[in-house]
């Protein structure tokens, strides 16, 4: 059994449902300490974060990952126990196999090989792991980034191991991500009988024109390689369940995924201007999930493009699509960030898996990137 497959199995066997780390980071820290890394545990609340470094000078290359996973769902829906890793048909099955314990295992093997071959390498190679990526993402990389700001920790490049490939390993390179902004909107009305609307105030009727305007708005035409900003309503709730009662309030959940044309503060102002113009009595709670980021052309993108082309056989697609990742907390430190990982077809699904061949290629891929950026 290869080193990366063995380590990935050990990690999957730990049921680290967010924010529980279940000992994954201790396992990694013990290995890296034996390889000469300085390992620091940064615990906030119930969240474990591991910061491991080798070297003391610049430039600093950071590998970023998470040890937590989403819940498995019903055990009986899986072909095998989600926390008992199984190789079947050339794939490694288990919760977190693709997202992202496979990448974490590959990171560890890659840096072990790198420092063994290059003990006096240029710059610093570092690994940051959190157990709060799949959950609230409050006490994970977001908090660690605050620590880095206070310390004046400089990071030049960041490679996140999120499963980014579409059909074959290395066919896509993420060079940025959209920002995300969520809201819980409560529109106040006056409850009453549907036969006497003049004695009530229907918040659904009042809110609909404003919501239609927000949903129909063309926010922008896109930005560089980013798609246009989108507004999506994800939930609407009102009423008592009776068809003869005008509801007293309406609750709406919505989200904006936005490109660098905007920031969260400006979007909040734009949305509230519409609500106020329509004369709504409302309360709104905003949740800023992260600002957009974009890595320009430079040594990181150049190295990644060339290495991925060698592994996949063709130049990768360069994209800013998808959801969010913890890179959104690192990029504001002035760090150039990219994302490279295995195929994402099964992430968060029943019978999540990763190709064993891809898993065993990942350490070589990450090692090639490290060697390009921090030559010995």
Image: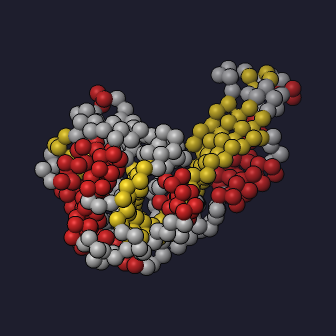
Please report the residue visible at 83 percent of the width from the left and 45 percent of the height from the top: 279
Residue 248: x and y in percent read 76, 28
The image quarter containing residue 235 is: top right
Query: Who is closer to the viewer here, 37 or 86?
Result: 37
The image quarter containing residue 124 is: bottom left
Please report the residue visible at 54 percent of the width from the left and 57 percent of the height from the top: 147
Please report the residue visible at 62 percent of the width from the left and 48 percent of the height from the top: 287
Q: Is residue 163 visible?
A: yes
Taking the view exactly as shown, the residue that stands out farthest to the right is 198
Say which quadrant the C terminus sits in.
Answer: bottom left
| Number of residue marks | 0
What kind of colouring is applied to the model shown? Answer: secondary structure
Q: In the figure, is residue 303 to the left or right of 293? A: left
Query: Who is closer to the viewer here, 264 or 144?
Result: 144
Please report the residue visible at 37 percent of the width from the left and 55 percent of the height from the top: 39
Q: In the figure, is residue 176 to the left or right of 356? A: right
Against 184, is 329 above or below? Answer: below
């Amino acid at each position: 059994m290869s080193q990366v497959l063995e380590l990935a199995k050990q990690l999957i066997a730990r049921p680290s449902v967010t924010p529980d780390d279940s000992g994954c980071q201790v396992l990694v820290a013990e290995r890296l300490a034996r390889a000469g890394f300085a390992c620091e545990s940064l615990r906030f609340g119930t969240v474990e974060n591991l910061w491991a470094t080798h070297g003391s000078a610049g430039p600093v290359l950071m590998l970023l990952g998470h040890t937590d996973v989403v819940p498995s769902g019903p055990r009986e829906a899986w072909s095998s126990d989600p926390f008992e890793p199984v190789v079947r048909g050339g794939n490694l099955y288990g919760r977190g196999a693709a997202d992202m314990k496979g990448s974490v295992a590959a990171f560890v093997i890659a840096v072990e090989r790198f420092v063994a071959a290059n003990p006096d390498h240029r710059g610093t190679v570092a690994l940051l792991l959190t157990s709060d990526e799949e959950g609230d993402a409050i006490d994970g990389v977001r908090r660690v980034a605050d620590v880095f700001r206070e310390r004046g920790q400089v990071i030049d490049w960041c490679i996140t191991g999120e499963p980014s490939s579409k059909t074959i390993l290395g066919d896509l390179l993420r060079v940025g991500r959209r920002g995300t902004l969520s809201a819980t909107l409560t529109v106040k009305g006056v409850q009453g009988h549907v036969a006497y609307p003049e004695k009530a105030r229907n918040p659904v009727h009042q809110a609909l024109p404003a919501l239609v305007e927000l949903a129909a708005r063309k926010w922008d035409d896109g930005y560089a390689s980013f798609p246009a900003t989108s507004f999506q309503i994800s939930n609407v709730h009102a009423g008592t369940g009776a068809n003869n009662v005008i509801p007293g309030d309406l609750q709406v959940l919505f989200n904006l995924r936005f490109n660098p044309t905007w920031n969260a503060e400006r979007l909040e102002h734009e949305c509230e201007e519409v609500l106020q113009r329509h004369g709504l009595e409302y309360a709104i709670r905003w949740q800023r999930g992260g600002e957009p980021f974009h890595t320009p052309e430079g040594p990181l993108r150049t190295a990644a493009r060339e290495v991925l082309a060698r592994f996949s056989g063709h130049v990768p697609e360069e994209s800013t699509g998808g959801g969010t990742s913890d890179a959104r907390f690192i990029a504001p430190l002035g760090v150039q960030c990219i994302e490279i990982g295995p195929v994402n077809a099964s992430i968060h699904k029943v019978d999540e898996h990763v190709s064993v061949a891809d898993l065993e290629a990942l350490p070589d891929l990450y090692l090639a990137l490290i060697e390009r950026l921090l030559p010995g």
